[in-house]
Structures are given as structure tokens and as C-alpha cells.
């Protein structure tokens, strides 16, 4: 959740998707999380936490995406993915920019950031809070783009330290807005842990790229 860009390697997530990489089906990019400086930073004001999320989004779109497209082609549309609060970042990135990404695989996530912000609210909170801004979409571009999606996975376990109700709530919003998605609840033995995310990610990549 408060990860650096090497976390996927340390916890062997790169190893389990290596067959997709070595076969040329995908190229993987891992970037630092902002959560330790933002949502998980007890010393920061709620205003700063939300502002930093907006800066992080700008960093992805203005620095990371150009790098990816330089290496993969200007028409490249990455699939975002993350686990725990990384799932929030992955989903937020995709749902804010659905015309720039193929989809998202969000594992064991929370999609409502208000509990981290002590009831503080401003535009930065709203536009980085998928539970709010997706629920209110009614435009003629953003929502129709999402309604044509074919690669949205919102998945969670139901075991120790998981919060499946958060996935259920967000999937309810997607259903209400007519956004196609795969909402799955793995078993009550499936805990909030890397052991299970190492199973989830290749399972869903196989569905997309297999």
C-alpha cells in the first residue's frame, strides 16, 4: 500500500507474470506509490493528502505515459493493476482516463478515500474518489467510453483483513452506471495478502491475454 516501485519484485509478483512477459504478450511497468506520503501520512493535512493525489495523477499522465508510449508505441493503452491501496491508485487512474488505458485489475481495494481525510472535502478529494465521481458521471464522452469497456476487474478475497463490502459497493456503482466489469469475490480463506494476489493477477491476465 505504501510501496516503492520494487515491491512487485520483492513479493514475487513479477515472477508469476513472467510467462506473459517472456512470450511478448505484455511489458510490465512498476512505479512508486504515493500512499505513504498521502493517504497513509498521519502528519499531513487532509488538504495536502488530496492535493498530492492530483499531483500523482499528473505525474502518471505527463511523465509515465509518454515513457510507455515511447517504448510501446503511441497507440499503447496500458492495463493498470494494484493491490490494497494500490488497487485504489490503479482504479483511480483508469476511471479518470478511460480513453488512455485498456482497463484495470484492482485487487482487494478500497475505492472511497473519505475515511482517510477526516471529512475534509474539496475538488481534489472529489476527483480522486472513484465512489463519488464515477457515481455522478453523466457526460457524453467519459461515461460512454467506460460503458464500452471490456477489461475491468474488481476482485477481493473474503478472508482475514479483507473488506469485501468495499468491492461490493464500488461494483454497485459500476452496475448502476452501466459500466461492464467483472466483480468477483474469492473464498473466505482468501486473505489480504501477497500469496493470494500472486494467484489473482496471472489468473485475470490469462483471461485477457491467454
Image (cartoon, rainbow, N blue to C red):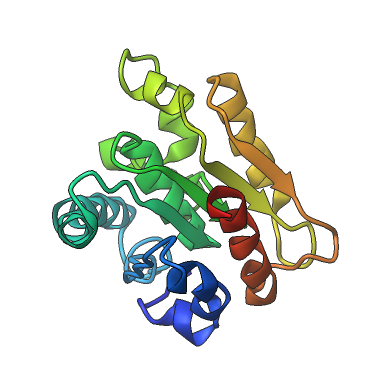
Identify which residue, 66 or 136, lies in the foreground.
Answer: 66
- The residue sitting at the bottom extreme is 10
Identify which residue, 122 or 186, lies in the foreground.
Answer: 186
Q: Which residue lies at the image location 31% right of the left edge and 38% below the top edge?
A: 97
Which x, y percent locates residue 38? Answer: 34, 63
Q: Quadrant of the C terminus?
A: bottom right
Q: Which residue lies at the image location 19% right of the left edge and 54% below the top edge?
A: 69
Indicate left or right for 13 with 52 as reference: right
- The residue sitting at the front extreme is 23
Q: Quadrant of residue 84?
A: bottom right
Q: Which residue lies at the image location 71% right of the left edge and 60% below the top edge?
A: 162
Q: Quick check: can you spot residue 117?
A: no
Q: Which residue lies at the image location 64% right of the left edge and 39% below the top edge?
A: 182
- The residue sitting at the right extreme is 188
Q: Quick check: can you spot residue 39?
A: yes
Indicate left or right for 204 with 72 as reference: right
Which x, y percent locates residue 140? Answer: 32, 13
Identify which residue, 48 or 9, lies in the foreground.
Answer: 9
Q: Quadrant of residue 128?
A: top left
Q: Quadrant of residue 120?
A: top left
Asked if 27 appears above or below 65 in the picture, the reply is below
How many marks on residues? 0
Asked if 122 appears above or below 109 in the picture, the reply is above
Which x, y percent locates residue 15? Answer: 53, 80
Which x, y percent locates residue 112? Answer: 51, 44
Amino acid at each position: 500500500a505504501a510501496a516503492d516501485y520494487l515491491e512487485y519484485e520483492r513479493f514475487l509478483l513479477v515472477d508469476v507474470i513472467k510467462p506473459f512477459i517472456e512470450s511478448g504478450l505484455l511489458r510490465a511497468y512498476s512505479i512508486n506509490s504515493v500512499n505513504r506520503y498521502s493517504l497513509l501520512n498521519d502528519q499531513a493535512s487532509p488538504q495536502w493528502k488530496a492535493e498530492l493525489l492530483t499531483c500523482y495523477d499528473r505525474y502518471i499522465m505527463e511523465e509515465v505515459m509518454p515513457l510507455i508510449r515511447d517504448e510501446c508505441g503511441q497507440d499503447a493503452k496500458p492495463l493498470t493493476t494494484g493491490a490494497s491501496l494500490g488497487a485504489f491508485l490503479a482504479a483511480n487512474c483508469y476511471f479518470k482516463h478511460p480513453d488512455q488505458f485498456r482497463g484495470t485489475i484492482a485487487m482487494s481495494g478500497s475505492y472511497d478515500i473519505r475515511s482517510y481525510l477526516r471529512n475534509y472535502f474539496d475538488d481534489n478529494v472529489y476527483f480522486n474518489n472513484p465512489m463519488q465521481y464515477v457515481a455522478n458521471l453523466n457526460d457524453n464522452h467519459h461515461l460512454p467510453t467506460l460503458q464500452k469497456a471490456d477489461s475491468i476487474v474488481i476482485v477481493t478475497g473474503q478472508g482475514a483483513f479483507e473488506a469485501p463490502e468495499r468491492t461490493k459497493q464500488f461494483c454497485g456503482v459500476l452496475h448502476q452506471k452501466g459500466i461492464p466489469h467483472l466483480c468477483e469475490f474469492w473464498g473466505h480463506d482468501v486473505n489480504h495478502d501477497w500469496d493470494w494476489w500472486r494467484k489473482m493477477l496471472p489468473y485475470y491476465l490469462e483471461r485477457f491475454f491467454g
